[in-house]
Amino acid sequence: AQSVTQLGSHVSVSEGALVLLRCNYSSSVPPYLFWYVQYPNQGLQLLLKYTTGATLVKGINGFEAEFKKSETSFHLTKPSAHMSDAAEYFCAVSPATSGTYKYIFGTGTRLKVLA
Amino acid sequence: KAGVTQTPRYLIKTRGQQVTLSCSPISGHRSVSWYQQTPGQGLQFLFEYFSETQRNKGNFPGRFSGRQFSNSRSEMNVSTLELGDSALYLCASSPGTPGEGYTFGSGTRLTVV
């Protein structure tokens, strides 16, 4: 069965510092991978996704993530944090094989940006 | 392109009542999924509908049900509400093929008193 682990339920960074949010997955076959962001009282918004091809994926708001098959990881990074990045971030996986379309979400990481 | 619309945004119900939540997906999207989000349990998958058929189901009791109409709009129903059903219910639409990702609605905040 597939699973997703997000290390750190809360992460604090200073404004302008590097943001690193960790995501590891468990799957017998590399899945499709996603990062979503959720602002208070809103739904989730897709930041970026990896399906095939280039392992470094760029998303919206200056975020990027790198798929590392050997480490079964898909960590999210941003070179310089902005106050507006404060939100909750979810990593998700979806099987890359047809027939199963359920997405599995991690437990989320709440990012706090300090002035 | 209009986004995913969920109605109502907020709802207060009494224990034992039933509730129906509505979701209108993005035009052309045939898949609608429902999630329950609570602080303690995170995002829990309820079910997914594709072309009016339930394609996937999570581990929720039978009090939780859903349906999808021919125009892809979806409703979910919770009968005999319990205090623990208080949550943010999120609807997500997608084209329905692997790897597409979801577009989420803003959710319905259900409070059971």
Image (cartoon, rainbow, N blue to C red):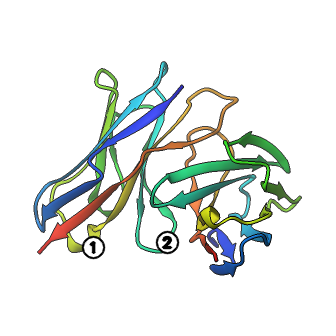
Kind of residue indicated by mark 1: Ser
Residue carrying label 1: A84
Left or right: B56 as drawn, with respect to A94: right
Q: Position of residue B59 (x, y in %)?
A: 67, 42
**Could you tell me which secondary element the residue under label 2 belongs to?**
loop
Which residue is rendered at x = 61% and y = 48% of the image? B45
Which quarter shows the C terminus of chain B? bottom right
Contact (Cβ within 8 Å) of mark 1 with mark 2: no
Residue located beneath label 2 in the image: A42
Q: Earlier in the sequence, mark 1 or mark 2?
A: 2
**Residue shown at the point (27%, 73%) measured from the top left:** A84
Q: Which mark is residue B14?
A: none
Please tell me which residue is depicted at 61% across the width and 55% down the height of the picture: B35
Q: Residues within 10 Å of mark 1 (few under 14, many from 20)?
A: few
Q: Chain of mark 1?
A: A
The amino acid type, in three-letter code, at marker 2 is: Gln
| Vertical side of A88 occupied by A5: above or below | above
Mark 1 vs mark 2: tell me if same chain: yes
- The tally of labels here is 2
B41 sits left or right of A65 in the view: right
What residue lies at 85% left-to-right and 51% top-to-bottom?
Answer: B52
Q: Is residue B38 visible?
A: yes
What whole-number distance in Å separates the C-alpha atoms at marks 1 and 2? 15 Å
x, y percent for residue B106: 56, 71
On the image, which quarter does residue B55 sit in? Answer: top right
Crowd band around label 2 with a 10 angstrom C-alpha radius: few (<14), some (14–19), many (20+): some
> Where does residue B75 sit, x and y in percent of width and height?
79, 64
Q: In this rendering, is residue B45 above or below A56? A: below
Element marked by disc 1 = helix
Please provide percent x and percent y for residue B70: 89, 58
Left or right of B96, for residue A75: left
